[in-house]
Amino acid sequence: MQSQTETERNRAIVQASFDRWRAGTGSPFELLAEEADWTIVGSSPLSKTYPNRQAFLDEVIGPFNARMATRLVPEVRAIYADGDMVIALFDAAATANDGEPYRNTYTWYFRMSDGKVINAVAFFDTREFDEFWNRVAPARQ
């Protein structure tokens, strides 16, 4: 069983990264270890396991941000932690390059080690995501 200290430390690390993301001064992706894998669950063409931080950033986050006119801003509902596992439940919204809103609700499961995310699993409305992804062309990458 993991110590309460580890649980609270991991929760605080993730909370602080979401706070920075909301403020526009950081993001939870800075917590990813280089070798961290990220799995998008569902039936989206992007649903798969990305084998490391760079693959995930290159294939998902870069093209996602390139489709946005404004940055994605999270509204955290809750962050739960138990030992090395941290779960973030949040809503996020932005305006896409076509002027239409993008909104989704996410649950991310982070397995932590030494203050870094080593494994992530993401759940969200893949239908909403796919509609946006196919509708909006990236402006830059």
Image: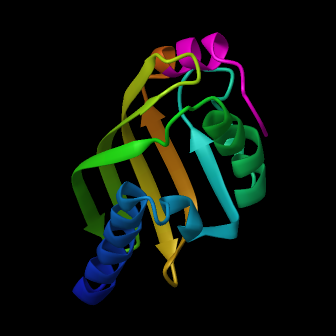
- Residue 112, given in percent of the width and then of the height, sits at 48, 71
Between 56 and 96, the one lying in front of the other is 96
- Residue 138, given in percent of the width and then of the height, sits at 72, 27
- Residue 74, given in percent of the width and then of the height, sits at 35, 46
Q: Residue at x 36, y 56 (%)?
A: 22
Q: Quadrant of residue 101?
A: top left
**Observer able to see residue 103:** yes
What are the residue bounds of the magenta stretch?
129-141
Above-or-below relation of 99 to 62: above
Residue 97 is left or right of residue 90, and the answer is: right
Q: What kind of colouring is applied to the model shown?
A: rainbow
Above-or-below relation of 132 to 27: above
Q: Residue at x 25, y 60 (%)?
A: 80
Instruction: Give the mark count.
Output: 0
> Which quadrant: the C terminus?
top right
Above-or-below relation of 72 to 83: above
Q: Is residue 140 magenta?
A: yes
Between 117 and 1, the one lying in front of the other is 117
- Residue 48, given in percent of the width and then of the height, sits at 67, 35
> Which quadrant: the N terminus?
bottom left
Q: Quadrant of residue 17?
A: bottom left
Between 73 and 107, the one lying in front of the other is 73
Q: Is residue 23 magenta?
A: no
Residue 35 is left or right of residue 105, and the answer is: right
Above-or-below relation of 95 to 107: above
Q: Quadrant of residue 32?
A: bottom right
**Observer able to see residue 1:** no
Residue 89 is left or right of residue 33, and the answer is: left
Q: Residue at x 35, y 72 (%)?
A: 16
Residue 80 is left or right of residue 87, and the answer is: left
